[in-house]
Image (tube, rainbow, N blue to C red):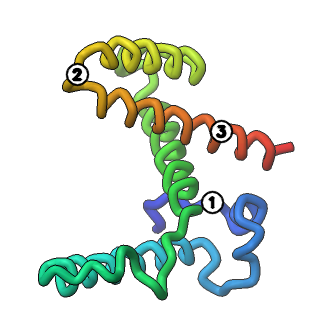
Amino acid sequence: MNDLPFPTREVFKQKFPTLVGDPQLRKLLLIHFTNWVNQMRYIIDEEWSIGNFSDLFPPHHPFPVAVTVYLVGMVDELKDEISTRTEGQMKKANITYQEESKEMLQHADDASTVPSNKYLYKQRKRTLLVIKVVRTLEEQNMQ
């Protein structure tokens, strides 16, 4: 039995139309990501460790950006499954995405006043921007 929440082939084809036709359809992004990680590890261990910084990233394996959206979708499905299976067993605060983003931004703004937290502040802002872009793209794909 498959424990990972892979989407059905039809759903995957709608989300990632450029990958349609590959026999490893739903595994392809994970395979590309694994190849990228292995090549990056080689570059760090074998080249950077001796001071050769001519390769900053794997030249033959570009980072599969779509894997991020794919993995976030899997995590969301796992989260939903956990919520369904534990419904009524735990008390939790149910808040919307907008409320969560507003709260994160508020805390990010508070952190920006402390000099040691400025890096974290910038990272949180970037993370929120990425989340917003991904949500916008997902909404556009649903239409």
Q: Which amino acid type is marked by label 1?
A: Pro
Residue at 34% over, 12% down: 110
The mark total stands at 3
Q: Is residue 90 above or below residue 23?
A: above
- Residue 36 appears left or right of 7: left
Q: In the figure, residue 114 lies in which quadrant?
A: top left
- Residue 116 appears left or right of 74: left
Question: SS class of the residue under badge 1?
Answer: loop
Work out whether mark 2 precedes mark 3 in sequence or the reverse, and give the earlier one: 2
Which mark is in front, 3 or 1? 3
- Residue 129 appears left or right of 34: right
Q: Which residue in the protein does label 3 denote?
A: 135
Q: Which residue in the protein does label 1 denote?
A: 7
Q: Which amino acid type is marked by label 3?
A: Arg
Q: Which amino acid type is marked by label 2?
A: Pro
Q: Which residue in the protein does label 2 denote?
A: 115
